[in-house]
Image (cartoon, grey):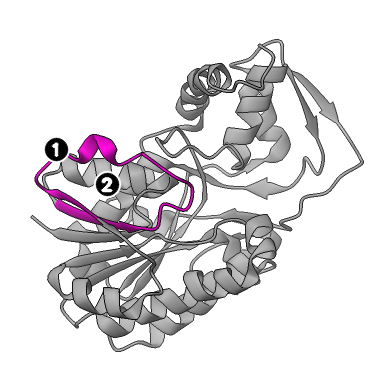
Amino acid sequence: MEKFLITGGAGYIGSILTEHLLEKKHSVTCLDNLSYHQRSLMSHASNPNFNFVYGDVRDEELLTSIVPEFSAIIPLAAIVGAPACKISPHDTRSINHDAVMLLNEIRNYDQKLIFPSTISVYGMQPKEQCTEESPLNPVSLYAEKKADSEKALVISDKDSVILRLATVFGASPRMRTDLLVNDFVMKAAGEGYLVLYEGHVMRNYIHVRDIARAFEHCIQNYEIMKNGIFNVGLKENFSKLDLAKKIKQHVPLLEIIASEIGEDVDKRDYRISSEKIERTGFTPIFSLDRGVEELIKVKDILLKNNPYKNI
């Protein structure tokens, strides 16, 4: 049994990862400041292998006191997405980068670290399929700080594994509807139409539960994966128009409206390959179709709990 410390453990990915690791009989401690007033971890309170620490990942005294007791650390705490990072640049730098460096400094050489980076670090590379050796071209503060953290961990004398995660989708107790797939499905199933601009832009996706599986896979295969960087996404890359058409297969009456007006705040356009992590034995099991079906169910739950929505 591994003893995990997950910072940001009450978040979108953290909630699912905590559940997954507890089901695998690991010990999990989540450190979170509950900035979104989440209650996503309450269902684990009766599990003796679960613990919660309320606090800030930038609190050096707190980290120094708790970090040494864990065998594996996953620093999920972050300001996520280009728009949120633009609003809070100071917090983005101090949480997304400085706090990761603090954790790396405090941990000992025997403690495993799995760092969740992002394929956003590739930025604008529409004509080439990006591998882990492709040049980085971050075009947002979020991607820039992830890239900076990667570089620091690569030159550190302590081992780590870096996962460049594709755009996440799927249901979570701490739901996010701003992510592209989640957002498209909510609008398609709730409103019956999608206004699509920059439909040619390419992206890659990964289900939140496959991310949890990927973290566990890294721990199980740490010796062969340590000091490596791995893309984590589906085999197939999709344009925004491809994604809209995929959703229409599940929402037949969906109207897709192409628009020349509007642009994505987060300027990214790339195709990625995840063959490197596949060679270690990891393969996603949650397809985009399965995720769309799941999110259609989530739409009803979210809408029915919104007192301001005219249903």
Q: Is residue 223 above or below residue 154?
A: above
Quarter of the image that includes the N terminus: bottom left
Identify the secondary structure beneath mark 1: loop
Residue 192 against residue 137 in the figure, above or below: above
Q: Quadrant of residue 138?
A: bottom right
Residue 120 against residue 12 in the figure, above or below:
below
Residue that mark 1 sits on:
46
Q: Mark 2 near mark 1, Cβ–Cβ under 8 Å?
A: no
Left or right: 122 in relation to 12: right
Tag shown at residue 18:
2
Q: Write down the region rendered in magenta.
A: 27-52
Q: Amino acid at mark 2?
A: Thr
Q: Is residue 106 left or right of residue 249?
A: left
> Can residue 228 be seen at all in this image of the molecule?
yes
In the foreground, 170 or 302: 302
Residue found 40% across the figure and 80% down from its top: 101
- Give percent across and percent down for residue 199: 77, 40
Foreground tag (2 vs 1): 1
Image quadrant containing the C terminus? top right
Q: Residues within 10 Å of mark 2 (few under 14, many from 20)?
A: many
> At 15% across and 43% down in the image, what residue appears?
24
Closer-to-camera residue (144/244)? 144
Q: Label 1 crowding class (10 Å Cα cut-off): few <14, some 14-19, many 20+?
A: few
